[in-house]
């Protein structure tokens, strides 16, 4: 009897001691990040049969269990990876929004000041100071374009660095998880017990990994984790890791991408497949906001430069010469894929800035079929594709027009060769003022129209406008003589020659790039002349046309719709850009706040199961202490009974 009581007491003391140690471990790790509360799991020993029934044999400690919920922990991890992506995106988009929307250093005030200078020139076209002020404001405007583009380019550089840093962190976490997989396997195979603290460390690493990129976990039968990212690419399997790398894209060497080991080479992971975490936030911000913003800024720069140049070329400067280019700029960029094997060349020319979009394009050669050369042109922004097919024997060099661009292809492409076309990416970085001499600003019109003094009617010609300078400057005066019987004007002196022009009241007359209207009713034999605008230093007609461009719709024409017209002005296009970025910034800010609350709720739910409650642990400590003391008292009684037997 004494031995049985002694064993029961001993088992109780051992169980109480295990409880005290476990409780103390919980208390010590109450503030340890990722720690899961543990508890002793004990069962009653098999009772001993006797004539009076089954007598208890004490207690046995089966294991020390960590209180952990896969469901709650997965919910918290998912909330954290989404929160990390939103926070990263939010930080970047705020920076971009502040940059574009700055009322003092942004583009809007520079654009307004430039056109104020154009208006001042129109008010006093002969003033050298007004001309110099216009050049100064133009240089300020182009400088603003370049500064904004440079800041966006720096953001790209920072994103590249962030991608490299994130990939390094992912690889480090993967190695640590693989190491813990091995340690857990060894520990649990030798004891058949759960290595609770090692499992906590591994789960904490998985949570940290998910703050970099969304990773899914598959639990293996041996206790290890298999970790996958992207579209199911394994990152960790047992104690083996698959190291990612950050490298320049084959399509665009300035763009860092994530690569995955594929045999002896590496395969690029699509940005869209890497969701969640800081890495997902950087990649999605770059593709969804930064690319579009920089392209939009470039489109505005190209649209301003081309349309302003076109109107400026229709004017005449103080020296009597036709206007030259006011702005200079670079054309669209074409990047050949680094993996191309064919010698084919692709060139792109800007034809019509009004039809430009903010998207890049990807051109891929798909081979020859029945003598036809087959290419596929994909619009990156929406993924829409257009098949391009032409006879190879006679089709090269082949040209096609798309969204204001003219693409020319030469022969020699290999199957799957591809090119990235960036129509507007370099527009803002390349724009500058081409003029340095204020006298070269073409504020005047190169022609003047007037009625002959001997005309019998009071009819006159409206101020003639110019739509083309191909036949200018005029080599001689052009005269129009009205033939009332035929109701037409005969034209003399025009080069190239012009046939008689039918007259209809109210209908403009146009030829050789010149356009004007007859005001009033002409009489038979009335003569009107169009001459070179000699001594037109005070003429402001072209300056007024340049000033009108500020509010004219010059951008946003849908080239795929016949007869469509430009839908927005310079200021409107920039306002759309600022508004779009600002709206995205506000949305992500709201999402970040909401996600913070989601994380807090998920963490609270997870901690309700796994967190350490010090009040509860203090109560457990007292309970185990009392159990230990009671078991000790039982052993003391057993010893006393045994001694009584010995004393008989």
Image: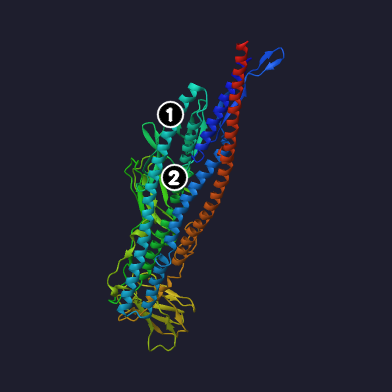
Give the residue pinned by disc 2.
279
Q: Secondary structure at mark 2?
A: helix
Q: Secondary structure at mark 1?
A: loop
Is 270 left or right of 75, judged from the image as shown? left
Badge 2, how many Cα within 10 Å: few under 14, some, many 20+? many
Residue 430 in sight here: yes
Residue 357 in sight here: no
- Number of marks: 2
Residue 560: % across, % down: 49, 56
At x 38% / y 40%, what residue is drawn?
Answer: 168
At x 36% / y 34%, what residue is drawn?
Answer: 265
Residue 457 circle label: none
Residue 239 circle label: 1
Looking at the rendering, which quadrant does residue 7 occupy? top right
* Mark before the other along the chain sequence, 1 or 2: 1
At x 32% / y 71%, what residue is drawn?
Answer: 136
Looking at the rendering, which quadrant does residue 313 occupy? bottom left
Is 50 left or right of 606, judged from the image as shown? right
Residue situated furthest top in the rendering:
648
548, 577: nearer the viewer: 577
Residue 272: % across, % down: 47, 44
Spatial distance from mark 1 to mark 2, Cα to Cα? Answer: 24 Å
Quadrant that contains the N terminus = top right
85, 512: nearer the viewer: 85
Residue 542: % across, % down: 37, 75
- Compared with 639, 166 (above or below) is below
Badge 1, how many Cα within 10 Å: few under 14, some, many 20+? some
493, 203: nearer the viewer: 203
What colour scheme has been applied to the protein in the rendered image?
A: rainbow
């Amino acid at each position: 009897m004494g031995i049985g009581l002694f064993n029961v007491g001993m088992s109780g003391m051992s169980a109480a001691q295990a409880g005290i140690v476990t409780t103390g471990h919980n208390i010590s790790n109450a503030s340890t990040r990722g720690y899961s509360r543990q508890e002793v799991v004990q069962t009653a020993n098999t009772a001993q049969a006797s004539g009076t029934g089954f007598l208890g044999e004490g207690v046995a400690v089966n294991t020390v269990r960590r209180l952990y919920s896969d469901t709650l922990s997965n919910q918290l991890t998912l909330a954290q990876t989404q929160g990390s992506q939103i926070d990263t995106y939010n930080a970047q988009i705020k920076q971009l929004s502040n940059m574009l929307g700055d009322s003092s250093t942004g583009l809007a005030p520079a654009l307004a000041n430039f056109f104020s200078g154009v208006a001042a020139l129109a008010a006093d076209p002969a003033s050298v100071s007004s001309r110099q002020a216009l050049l100064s404001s133009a240089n300020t405007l182009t400088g603003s374009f370049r500064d904004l583009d440079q800041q966006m380019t720096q953001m790209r550089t920072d994103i590249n660095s962030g991608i490299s840093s994130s990939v390094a962190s992912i690889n480090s976490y993967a190695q640590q998880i693989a190491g813990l997989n091995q340690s857990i396997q060894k520990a649990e195979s030798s004891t058949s017990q759960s290595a609770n603290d090692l499992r906590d460390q591994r789960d904490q690493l998985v949570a940290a990994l998910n703050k970099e990129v969304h990773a899914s976990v598959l639990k293996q039968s041996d206790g290890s984790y298999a970790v996958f990212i992207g579209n199911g690419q394994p990152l960790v399997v047992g104690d083996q890791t698959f190291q990612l790398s950050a490298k320049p894209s084959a399509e665009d060497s300035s763009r860092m991408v994530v690569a995955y080991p594929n045999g002896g080479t590496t395969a690029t992971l699509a940005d869209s497949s890497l969701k969640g975490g800081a890495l997902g936030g950087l990649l999605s911000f770059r593709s969804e906001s930064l690319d579009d913003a920089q392209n939009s800024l470039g489109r505005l720069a190209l649209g301003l430069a081309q349309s302003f140049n076109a109107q400026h070329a229709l004017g005449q400067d103080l020296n009597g010469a036709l206007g030259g280019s006011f702005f200079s700029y670079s054309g669209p960029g074409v990047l050949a894929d680094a993996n191309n094997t064919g010698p084919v060349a692709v060139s792109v020319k800007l034809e019509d800035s009004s039809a430009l979009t903010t998207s890049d394009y990807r051109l891929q050669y798909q081979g020859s079929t029945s003598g036809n050369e087959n290419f596929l042109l994909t619009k990156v922004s929406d993924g829409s594709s257009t098949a391009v097919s032409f006879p190879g024997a006679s089709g090269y060099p082949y040209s096609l027009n798309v969204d204001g661009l003219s693409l020319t292809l030469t022969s020699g492409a290999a199957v799957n060769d591809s090119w990235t076309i960036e129509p507007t990416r370099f527009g803002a970085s390349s724009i500058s003022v081409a003029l340095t001499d204020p006298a070269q600003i073409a504020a005047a019109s190169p022609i003047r129209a007037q009625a002959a003094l001997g005309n019998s009617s009071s009819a006159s010609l409206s101020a003639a406008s110019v739509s083309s300078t191909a036949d200018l400057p005029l080599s001689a005066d052009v005269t129009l003589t009205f033939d009332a019987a035929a109701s037409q004007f005969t034209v003399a002196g025009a080069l190239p020659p012009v046939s008689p022009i039918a007259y209809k009241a109210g209908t403009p007359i146009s030829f050789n790039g010149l356009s004007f209207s007859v005001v009033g009713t002409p009489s038979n034999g009335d003569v009107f002349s169009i001459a070179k605008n000699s001594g037109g230093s005070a003429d402001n007609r072209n300056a007024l046309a340049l000033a009108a461009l500020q509010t004219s719709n010059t951008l946003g024409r849908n080239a795929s719709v016949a007869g469509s017209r430009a839908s927005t002005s310079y200021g409107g296009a920039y306002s759309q850009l600022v508004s779009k970025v600002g709206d995205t910034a506000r949305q992500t800010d709201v999402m970040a706040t909401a996600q913070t609350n989601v994380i807090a709720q998920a963490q609270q739910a997870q901690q309700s199961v796994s967190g350490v409650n010090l009040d509860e642990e203090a109560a457990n400590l007292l309970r185990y202490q009392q159990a230990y003391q009671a078991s000790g008292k039982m052993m003391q009684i057993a010893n006393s009974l045994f001694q009584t037997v010995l004393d008989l």
